[in-house]
Amino acid sequence: MTPRKPEDNRELLEQRRSEILEAALKVFARRGLAGTRVGDIAAAAGLSHGLIYHYFRSKDEIFTELVKIAYQVSLGTVVAAAELPGTAWEKLKAMTEMIVSGAYRGDGPYYFLIILQAFTSEAVPEEVKKMTVENSHRYVEVVAPLLEEAARTGEIAPADPIQLATTYFSLIQGLAIMQVQGGGSLPSPDPEVALRLLKGPVGENQEKEPGSSSQRGEQQDETPGRAWAETVFGPVKLKKERLFYRTKKRAEKKYTVHSALLTETGDSYRMESIEEDGARAVAITEKANWRPRLVQKFNAAGKKITEITYGDGWVLFDLEEREVQKKLSLSGEYYDFHTLSFLFRAYPFGSKERVTFRLVMDGSGGSPLTAVIMYLQEIKREEVTVPAGTFDCFKLEMGVGGMAGVFAAKYRYYFWYPVAEPRFLIKYESAGGDLVELTGEEPPSGASLG
C-alpha cells in the first residue's frame, strides 16, 4: 500500500475537522454549550467518542472555533458591504440583502445562535469572552456612520445612529432565532421590511418629532465621523479641590486610599489621581466638551508606563510595560475611561436623560484596547452615607449600550453626586462589588498622598 503524502494527511485532517465542526454547530445551537457533551457531537458526526479527541482537545475548543468562524463571516459581510461604492443608503441596502441571503440559508441561522450564546452563556471559555468583548461593538461602529450619513442626506429619518444600528441588528438577530425555532418553516424575511423601518418620513416637509434637534434649534455637527447629536457633557462650575477617597476591590477586605484633583487651565481640564503607593495618573481634556487629549500613567517610582494620545477621530496607545503600541479610529462622542468620575459631574442632573457615548478602554483589568458603547442615566435621588458624611445625591447608572447591552445586563456601574453644587463624586459601586467612597478633604492618618 502506498503511504499517504504529508499534504494528503493535512487534507484529511482538515476535512475531518470540518465535518466535526459542521455537526457540532447544530448541536451547540440547539442544546447550548453547557447542555452539549462530546458524545453528542460524535454521534452527530458519525464518529466514535474517542476519535473526536484526535482532532480537538475538548468541546470548549470546538465551540471556540465555531465562534471564530461566526464572527469572521458575520463581520466580514458587514465590513464588505460598508466598503462597496455608492451612497450610504445603497451600502445599507446591499448590506441587508447580503445578511439576509446568507443568514437565513443553510447554516446561517445556527451561526447567529452561536454568537448569541457567546454573549449570554456564563459557561463559555475565557477566549470566547475576550473575543466577544472585542467584536461586539464593531457591528455598530461600522454601520452607525452609514446611518449618520444617510440621515444627513435625507435618505432615512433622522435619529440617533447608534440606536438605529442597535435596532437594525437586533431585528436581524431576532429573525434568525425565529427561523431556527421554526425549524426552517418560516419564510425568509424580505430585506425591504428591515429597510422600511429605517426610512421613516423623510424630506424637506417632514414633521419633526417633539424634542428633535431641529425643533430645539440645536446645531447639528457636520464633522465626519461624529454623531450628529449635540455634545451632552459641557463645562462645569469648578473650584480647585483635592478630595480623598478610599477604595476596596470586590476580592479584597482592605481599603486603599487615593486622592483626586481637578483643575482648569485655559481651554482644558486637568485631572490627577494619586494612589497610596505614589503611582499616579494624569488626564487632560477639552473644557468645552470633555473630549480627551492626553492620558499618562506613572508607577510608584515615577516612571511613565502608559501614554494615550488623542487626535481628531483617533487614539494612539503606547503601553510601555506591555510593549504595546496601537492606533484606533474613533467616531461619535467618545471619552476616556480615566476621566469618568470627573466627566459625570457634567451630566444634566435632574433630567433623567439617557446619554449614549463611546468609552475608550486602555486594557486595564483585562479589558480590550477598544471603544465600548456605553449609556449613562440618572435613576433616582437618595441619601448616601460615606466616611465624609451624609449627602443628598443623584444616583447615576452606567451600563453597556448598543447591541451588546441586551446581553450584558449584569455589567452595571453606579455613581453618586450631590444635588447641591459643586458636584463631585461621593460614591462609586460596581455590580461586582468594587467600592469607592469619599473620605473628606484631608488624607486619613498614615496616607502619604501628594
Image (cartoon, rainbow, N blue to C red):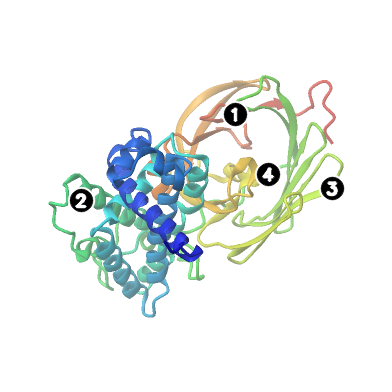
State which tag comes first along the sequence, 2 or 3: 2
**Which callout, 4 or 1, points to the residue nearer the camera?**
1
Q: Quadrant of residue 423?
A: top right
Q: 264 left or right of 410? A: right
Q: 110 left or right of 221? A: left
**Numbered mark located on residue 238 in the image:** 4
Marks 2 & 4, CB-CB < 8 Å contact? no
Q: Amino acid at mark 2?
A: Gln
Marks 3 & 4, CB-CB < 8 Å contact? no
Between 294 and 261, the one nearer to me in the picture: 294
User: Label 2: which residue?
Assistant: 179
How far apart, in angstroms, are the residues tagged by discs 2 and 3?
A: 56 Å
Residue 24: x and y in percent read 34, 46
User: Label 3: which residue?
Assistant: 303
State which tag comes first along the sequence, 4 or 1: 4
Residue 407: x and y in percent read 39, 41
User: Label 1: which residue?
Assistant: 434
- Which residue is pictured at 42% across the width and 40% down the height? 59
Q: Amino acid at mark 1?
A: Asp
Q: Quadrant of residue 193?
A: bottom left
How far apart, in angstroms, are the residues tagged by discs 4 and 1?
A: 28 Å
How far apart, in angstroms, are the residues tagged by discs 1 and 3?
A: 27 Å
Q: Quadrant of residue 69?
A: bottom left
State which tag comes first along the sequence, 1 or 3: 3
Marks 1 & 2, CB-CB < 8 Å contact? no
**Which callout, 3 or 4, points to the residue nearer the camera?**
3
